[in-house]
Amino acid sequence: MRASEILEFVTGLLIALVGLAAAAGLAEVKRMAPVINLGVVLAVAAAGAAMFSHALYRRARRVREPDLFWLRACGLALAATSATLALAIALPLWLAPLGLFKIGGFPLGYYAAAELVPILLVVLAFWQARAMDRLDDPSRPESDPS
Amino acid sequence: MSPEPTPSPSTPSAATGALAALASWSVAGSVVSLMGLLYQLGFDGLAFVVGPVAGLVLGSILLAPQLARSGAVSIPDFLRRRLGRPAQVLAALTIALTALILAVAGISSAASLLRFAFGMPFPPSAVVAALAATAIALPSSGIVRSRLGALLGLLILAAVLGTAFALTLVLQGPALPHIAYGQALARIGDLERTLIVNGLASAQTLKPHLNPFLQIEPLSFAAIVLSLMAGTALLPLMLFGASPSPRAARATSAWTAALVLALALTAPVYAALAKVQFYETLAGKIALTALPSWLETPSRDGKLHIHGTSLALYETVSSARQSGALDIGSVTGKLAQDADAAVLKDWQALSEPVKKIVLDTLAAIDPTASTPMWDIYCGTLLPAVAAVSGNKQALLTLTALEIDPEVLILTLPQRLGLPYAITVLLAAGALASALAIASAAIAAAGRAIAGDEAPTRYRLAALGTAAAALSIAVVRHGTIDGLAPAALGFAAAGLFPALVLGLWWRRTGGAAAALGIAVGLALALGYTIGTHYAAVPFTGTWSAWSGTAPGAMRKFEALEAQWIGATSDNARETAWTALSALASGTPFVPGTANWFGIPAVASAAFALPLAFGLIILGSFLPRRPGREEADIVTRLRQPADIGTDE
């Protein structure tokens, strides 16, 4: 593994572990910083997981060049799955305190969870489908397995 | 390499497939049930919107295109070729079980809607619903079923969106419902305060609509979203099988998600508008002796309870009395023998003084007078029950009231003075949704039991599933709730880990996958059954893992002592009813029987990590992959067009 890959892997792992540790002792963390809730710590843990996964992906891509299509497909699936989990699980938990704020009488927290999150999820579905269609296209060099 | 199946010329287009999938998309029995859930749970109910939408997205990323790339036509077909026969058989069983439960939910929901529309009793309504769903499911050709599903999908979209625009037009003028309902959300808070200030609601029991995590804890919210997400990701594949190519699978999945978005964004609109309208009615201070006439039908159907009583209960007890049951004990015996399980449960939940009032008021009825039962119920029984329940003003209060939110949603257009045709349109959309779910589930069970290529066996299996679903719906009428999300949880627990790992990880082994499916499904089933049907012993056994507040646990212990120490059958029965209700809670909000406060509908949250862990660990055992398995793994790792050219 290259030094930059090791650095990214270790940093990501540490961030993920900090997020999980904070989730385990959430009551204490909330006492110190009330704005931090389950959504925030899950988002931190997910960011860490994304970072060390990216380091592994970089290494795999360098070492296993003939499997480029498969590596890219896996990377895209991993990134899109992480984004789906973050949008569906972490974001609604994080949005809850926004209910305290209203713009023009609209309660932001509820409105964002009910409208914004589903819209973002569907945008993600179309983005991923388009990216994967391009990857599956045989006229593109990265889809050539030879 | 095994031959690539040629895409059938009768494969539905992406639009048809997306519309059919939309029709059967709902985490409740129908789209109106989902709106009712949002009414009931407020912010916390959004887990039932976000989870399923995210599930469709997850399915389009992880499952549908890869399954199409493998060349398999269905989940069991893929598992047989990739992971062997035991995994295939277990997957088929999981799909059949899930589909049977979804069919029960769809038939129950459709029957309730037929009862609402035509006033038919439940059993014949359920027969009509089951016949209609079976007629849609019986054609063995997938394209015919898809087209029928797509028609139902169009009807649902027209009904839900059309009615939402009409309601918004009446309430707020010409505006987009999804933006305009922000005003209604703001109004709900004001009305909640008004109800509390006027003594029409209790500050302890009223759960403000917009405040998060009052009924479902954040951890449970995340668990429900996760469980529904994994279940919904599998749903289109279980119900309609695999697409002919990864590109088609991605197109269908993405368009399904886009169409579902229209429903997902509109469901909270209905919940908010229905709540505003109903709270405004309550704030007008309605006397129990002068209830609005639209409440009569739901009360007669057992969907409206005031101080625990309903017209359905009152009429049933009256019949029992006429057949000679004059005291509380003999009425209980008579109801246990003849009445609906739901009515018996209502009767058992009443306190002794209220039961006595019910019998006394029935005894005072003049048999020669022809006063309608509704008038006697409102004029005589309700004020007397209100007096012993502490409702001194004898007003209709939120505390005294328990109403099926679906009634409030379905009657909303009528109560706002919209033409009756709009109510009919909304009910038709809801009925289409329930029938689409039931028919797609019957077809899926038929395919899972009979295999993918046998029309006669398929029809027999579909008929058997429909008959079984109808029987369960009729026998368990009124006592089953939260079936559809529970079914999705079972599918997720059994299939998701094996399918994801089988599609994406070369090393996944057949024996480990079979073990993962069996253990995941068993854990989810065990947790659901344990927390619902054996809630009292479950609480005793797993109290150390329970996420219940100490106060509720103390109440459980006090009721348990009361039940053990009861000296009469009546007292024991009353204590047991209260104890089981406290222990089992509802499918969405757990009672004392739980692990870490997670409700039964999120059982997959426990099963998923366990099944993933077992399959991963088991797959490290040495084994030799077969030829077919090696072929399919190679195919999964190549671009789609290269795979099909070979």
Image (tube, rainbow, N blue to C red):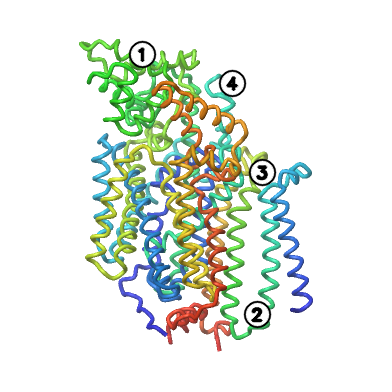
For the residue pair B68 and B476, the one nearer the viewer reads as: B476
Q: Which mark is residue A61?
A: 2
Residue placed under numbered mark 3 in the picture: A98
Q: Give the crowd class for mark 3: few <14, some 14-19, many >=20 residues within 10 Å.
A: some
Under circle 1, the secondary element is: helix
Are labels 3 and 2 assigned to the same chain? yes
- Give the amino acid type for the residue marked by disc 4 in the picture: Val
Q: CA distance from mark 1 to mark 4?
A: 28 Å
**Residue B173 drawn at (x, y percent):** 48, 38
B61 w.r.t. B152: above or below: below
Residues A104 and A115: in front is A115
Comparing labels 1 and 4, the label whose residue is closer to the camera: 1
User: Which of the numbered marks, if any, corresponds to residue B380?
Assistant: 1
Residue identifier under label 4: B197
Label 3, secondary structure: give it.
Answer: helix
Closer to us: mark 3 or mark 2?
2
Q: What is the C-alpha distance between the residues marked 2 and 4?
A: 65 Å
* Residue B276 on image: x %, y %: 50, 32
